[in-house]
Image: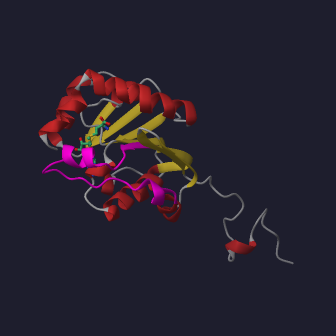
Amino acid sequence: MNENHALCATQEWSEHMRDEVVTYMSAHADLGESMLEIGPGAGASTEWLRHEVKRLVAMELDESSAAKLGQRFRGTNVEIVVGDATELACPDESFDSVGCFTMLHHVPTSRLQNAIFAQVLRVLRPGGVLVASDSLPSDGLHSFHVEDTYNPVDPGSLIARLQAIGFDRITVVVEDVLKFIAHKPMAEIGHEDCDEPSACTGPRRRAP
Ligand SMILES: C[S@@+](CC[C@H](N)C(=O)[O-])C[C@H]1O[C@@H](n2cnc3c(N)ncnc32)[C@H](O)[C@@H]1O
């Protein structure tokens, strides 16, 4: 990231993340006990999220940022791991919630952003929730990212993208920042050995 991103390590940005994002997400989504945060950066959201859940795993691509976070959150309920969210090395259905804040515009292509959404869906338990935010596309944001990756999310196509990947119960809020909440569908009940799932809508019928 370019030098302008020193902003992300300031108290001002941390308070912005608390007031504009984390407070909203905890009021509008059930974060459960076990949460994964992807792209924590300097930890502006991590600091507040960790009080909302029992266990927080924060996965950061950049090794030096991850090392600083490891020192900062040593001895707390936060576990820092180095990793790439496009290929999450986490078991299926291992988190109640996943947080992703101000990082999607740093992912160079829509295909890779979709790969992140698909990985998030995989690691969420049925009924689990993705809570996410990002800066809205603007000329100012583009200039801020001079000589840096700049691939903002288009809010207008976001619901269709998330639905195509498999999320449901989706809320998209466009205010000063883009915020969105999307759920992994609940597990279906009673379809275990069904040859024709579309015909199986309740308890399995016995063969005559
Ligand atoms: C602008 S910072 C946002 C930090 C923090 N979430 C916030 O809102 O202040 C974006 C972070 O996402 C990380 N990142 C980008 N692509 C990633 C990926 N594929 N997997 C994990 N982290 C990634 C970057 O290294 C960077 O630290």
Query: Residue at image x 44%, y 51%?
Result: 123
Picture quarter with the N terminus = top left
Instruction: Tell me the quarter of the picture where residue 66 sits.
Output: top left
Is residue 10 positioned above or below 34 on the image?
above
Is residue 52 among what the camera can see?
yes
Span highlighted in magenta in the image? 131-159
Compare residues 191 and 164 and report the one nearer the observer.
Answer: 164
Tell me, what colour scheme is on the image? secondary structure
Q: Quadrant of ligand 1?
A: top left
Q: Position of residue 46 (x, y in %)?
A: 34, 30
Q: Residue at x 39, y 33 (%)?
A: 56
Q: Is residue 185 within the magenta segment? A: no
Specify whether 206 is left or right of 200.
right
- In the figure, 33 relative to 200: above or below? above
Q: Which quadrant holds residue 48?
A: top left
Judged from this view, the residue extending furthest toward the front is 139
Indicate the position of residue 118 as horizontal and vertical percent values.
42, 59
Horizontal side, residue 70 vs residue 184: left or right = left
Which residue is located at x 41 percent, y 29 percent?
A: 49
Task: Inspect the magenta stretch and tell me whether residue 145 lies in it.
Answer: yes
Q: In the image as oriented, which residue stretches furthest toward the right?
A: 208
> Left or right of 123: which side holds 168?
right
The structure residue drawn at horizontal position 33% and vertical position 65%, both measured from the top left corner, is 111
Question: In front here: 36 or 206?
Answer: 36
Q: Quadrant of the C terminus?
A: bottom right
- Kindly tell me whether residue 54 is visible in this rendering: no
Residue 116 position in % (x across, y down): 37, 55
Image side of residue 187 versus residue 38, left or right: right
